[in-house]
Image: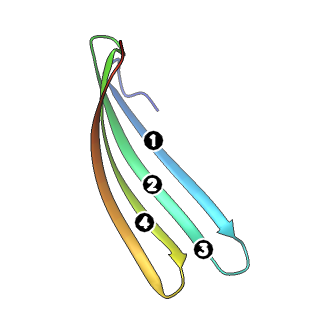
Amino acid sequence: MYLNDEWEVYARYVDRDTNTGDDVLSIGLNNYWAGQNARWTTEITWDDTVLNTDTTVISSQLQFYF
């Protein structure tokens, strides 16, 4: 969902196995520069697909288009 020309919020949900509740949820934010020629993304992901272990990952990246 675009908030304006520079900011975008997104979410992603994956139900990997409906019988065991193996789910992955990601929520992120994109910031665009120079139109969409450069992008900064930050995301948090909760992953419970590994048996008896939940994983939380926070990631950030810069991407440039040439």
Label 3, label 1: how many angstroms apart (C-alpha)? 21 Å
Label 3, label 2: how many angstroms apart (C-alpha)? 14 Å
Q: Residue 34, which numbered label?
A: none
- Mark 2, Cα crowd under 10 Å, few <14 / some 14-19 / many 20+, is some
User: Which residue shows up at 45% across the image and 54% down it?
Assistant: 26
Q: Amino acid at mark 3?
A: Asp
Label 4, label 1: how many angstroms apart (C-alpha)? 14 Å
Cβ atoms under marks 1 and 2 closer than 8 Å: yes
Residue marked by disc 4: 46
- Mark 3, Cα crowd under 10 Å, few <14 / some 14-19 / many 20+, is some
Q: Dot 2: what SS?
A: strand
Q: Dot 4: what SS?
A: strand
Q: Amino acid at mark 4?
A: Trp
Whole-percent x, y for residue 9 in the image: 40, 38
Label 1, label 2: how many angstroms apart (C-alpha)? 8 Å
Q: Earlier in the sequence, mark 1 or mark 2?
A: 1
Q: Earlier in the sequence, mark 2 or mark 4?
A: 2
Is 19 left or right of 33, judged from the image as shown? right
Cβ atoms under marks 3 and 1 closer than 8 Å: no
Q: Dot 3: what SS?
A: strand
User: Which residue shows up at 27% across the image and 45% down it?
Assistant: 60
Q: Earlier in the sequence, mark 3 or mark 1?
A: 1
Residue marked by disc 3: 22
Q: Residue 10, which numbered label?
A: 1
Whole-percent x, y for residue 14 in the image: 60, 58
Q: Nearer the viewer, mark 4 or mark 1?
A: 4
Cβ atoms under marks 2 and 4 closer than 8 Å: yes
Q: Residue 26, which numbered label?
A: 2
